[in-house]
Image (tube, grey):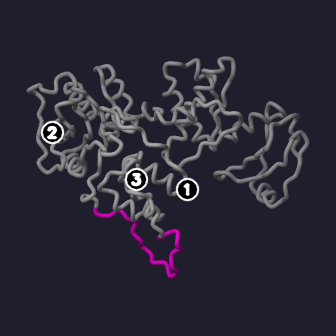
Amino acid sequence: MHFLIADSFTDSLARLTGDEQKQVKTTAFDLQLNPASPGMSFHKLDRAKDKNFWSVRVGSDIRLIVHRSEASLLLCYVDHHDKAYEWAERRKLETHPKTGAAQLIEIRETVQEVIVPVYVQSPSPLPASATQLLFQGVADDLLLSYGVPPEWLPDVKLATEDTLLALADHLPAEAAEALLELATGGKPRMPTPATANPFDHPDAQRRFRVMSNVEELQRALDFPWEKWTVFLHPEQRQWVERDYSGPARVSGSAGTGKTIVALHRAAYLARQHPDARVLLTTFSDTLANALQSKLNRLLTSQPRLAERIDVHSLEAIGLRLHKTQVGPAKLAPARTFANSWAMPPRRCRGINSAVTFCSLNGSMSLMLGNLITGKLIAT
């Protein structure tokens, strides 16, 4: 029997108190070692649509929701009694009929409202784009190939710009990403062929993990999906390892994995060029710190590799370059910057292209079109 855990389990585990988490982990280890042990208190969930959902008693009020079949035991969710039961009654585990991937589906009839409520009625008519049906002309078979659950097809067909994001929250990740890509004029990735085991499908591997032994489960529970936030989807590896002839841009909506691709690309370049340093930049120090934390988790076993990757904000890099080329920088006050905003582009000595001032995330940034070839002289 395969023993698996879902991302919904680790997410819910992280919301419990420290003592409650310890109890849940002990129960999880016992389930992995011997799920048929008489000490395991399984309770059939009569109101659940999926008849393979069971509740396992953890403590006086904590219940672990598992999906049990002859082939597998999946840890799905954990919470206090009523909330755990409510979660199970609204979901079912299915193999998608088109993609063959295992999916935890939110049951459509349990969702009372998908559209975004309108609290203030606009006196003017809404623009056509706001009410246009985004996927009316897309064939059902194509939507299914992107992983849209069959029972959610009618809602997808009625989706507009106003309702799409709310709808995406109820769909599996691969379906939501494909719909957002279609809505923004893009072309979703080609669907992956079905696999013999639904849990082996690349889309399923984003949310389910097979635990081969106690040590692997221990690591998984010590890093509740945090460790796996740096997991690279098999379809994204091509962008990480491609040999580009110049600068490249990877675009996509929120949650599609752009940050993960950037992290793995930095690590890949560091491995390919052992004598070089790699620079990974973002817009703010806060985001840079978050990237550094993810990079540390990604390269836990390769600290020397991580030492050759610099993660900084654009502002920090600008100040660092200025200090090495000129000296400590003296930033202009906000009023001076505001007055400069309306000035036409100027050329400065030592810079190959025009200097453009812009405001970015509330901070002042100096965007340079080309690399500095000499000393930057402020004027």
Amino acid residing under circle 3: Leu
Is residue 230 among what the camera can see?
Answer: no
Q: Residue at x 31, y 40 (%)?
A: 102
Residue at the left extreme, as displayed:
38
Which class describes the residues within 10 Å of circle 3: few (<14), some (14-19), or many (20+)?
Answer: many
**Would you name the residue on which mark 2 appears?**
60
What x and y, as percent, mark residue 323? 79, 33
Ranked by sequence position, the earlier of labels 1 and 2 is 2
Q: Is residue 76 above or below residue 161?
A: above
**Would you name the residue on which mark 1 appears?**
185
- Label 1–label 2 contact, CB within 8 A: no
What x and y, as percent, mark residue 215? 32, 19
Depth-wise, is mark 1 or mark 2 nearer the camera?
1
Q: Which residues are magenta?
A: 112-131
Ranked by sequence position, the earlier of labels 2 and 3 is 2
Left or right: 278 with respect to 236?
right
